[in-house]
Amino acid sequence: MWQPPDSTTIPAGTAGDMIRYGHTLISETARYLGPKGSVLQLSNGMNCQNCHLEAGTKPFGNNYSRVASVYPLFRARSNSRETIYKRISDCFERSLNGTAPDSSSREMIAIKAYIEWLGSEVTKDTPPTGAGIKKVPLLARAADPKKGRLVYQQQCSSCHGAGGEGQLQPDKVAYLYPPLWGPASYNDGAGIYRLFNLAGYVKYNMPFGVDYNSARLSDEEAWDVAAYINSMPRPHKDQGGDWHDLRQKPIDFPFGPYADAFSEQQHKYGPYQHMHP
């Protein structure tokens, strides 16, 4: 199972300072770059580590382990060969529903330095065990937001709020627990808005304290609560420029057009068995 490098491998001098600053920005994005950020006001108040858990180091917690080993990378969504800077920019514009820092800024350079350090021991083009998000087995039915609402009430609302609004810290600058929908949450262009991603993220990381060895939710509960969360209102991002080749569009991408004849509803919630490539 992948583990991040030991902190003793952080170099001395300016290079090390940038890696540490990058870690701080990932952990405490809102305090530096949020609506009340001390450096810039670019994002919605969530932290990068709300989606990339434990500052991008948690196994199957959407970590950064393989990023440095695969970028630059052609991505069908943008129909371009993307740099790490482009990947970071996407997170700011989609998951943080904001504006990306300039690629020449100290903040962007620091985040890139931190991500590259995390992946410095990963062999190029060889995905480490524990990278990304662990997949949840497909259901024989569509994911059900109504059933998911009950799961949310029982398992999620105590931290994220009955209305998905999250919990702000006492100083109102950053969230203790992030909002899962509404104007301060991720927009519908975020990767976590795809059901495959959110179901796996929830199953193996939530409620708080869970990891891939100690899942608390059943597969059905994970799919249903993901469907409920992503059925709720959130900011919209124009994605008209995405997916030039519709054949490359993921089957759980919730907006048409598609290269197949399945409905937008089925692409969003399933069932997926007969759609799966």
Image (tube, helix red, strand yellow):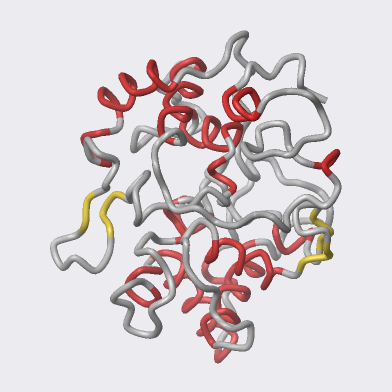
Residue 259, percent from left and from top: 83, 34
Q: Quadrant location of the N terminus?
A: top right
Up-down: is 3 above or below 37?
Answer: above
Up-down: is 106 above or below 173?
Answer: below
Q: Residue at x 73, y 37 (%)?
A: 250
- Side of 180 where 104 appears, left or right: right
Residue 211, percent from left and from top: 46, 34
- Side of 271 where 81 appears, left or right: right
Camera-side residue of 77 and 118: 77
Give the residue at the far bottom of this rendering.
14
Q: Residue at x 37, y 77 (%)?
A: 32
Q: Residue at x 48, y 28 (%)?
A: 227
Residue 175, percent from left and from top: 27, 58
Give the residue at the far top of this rendering.
140
Q: Residue at x 63, y 69 (%)?
A: 117
Q: Quadrant location of the C terminus?
A: top right
Residue 201, percent from left and from top: 51, 37
Camera-side residue of 109 and 143: 143
Up-down: is 76 above or below 138?
Answer: below
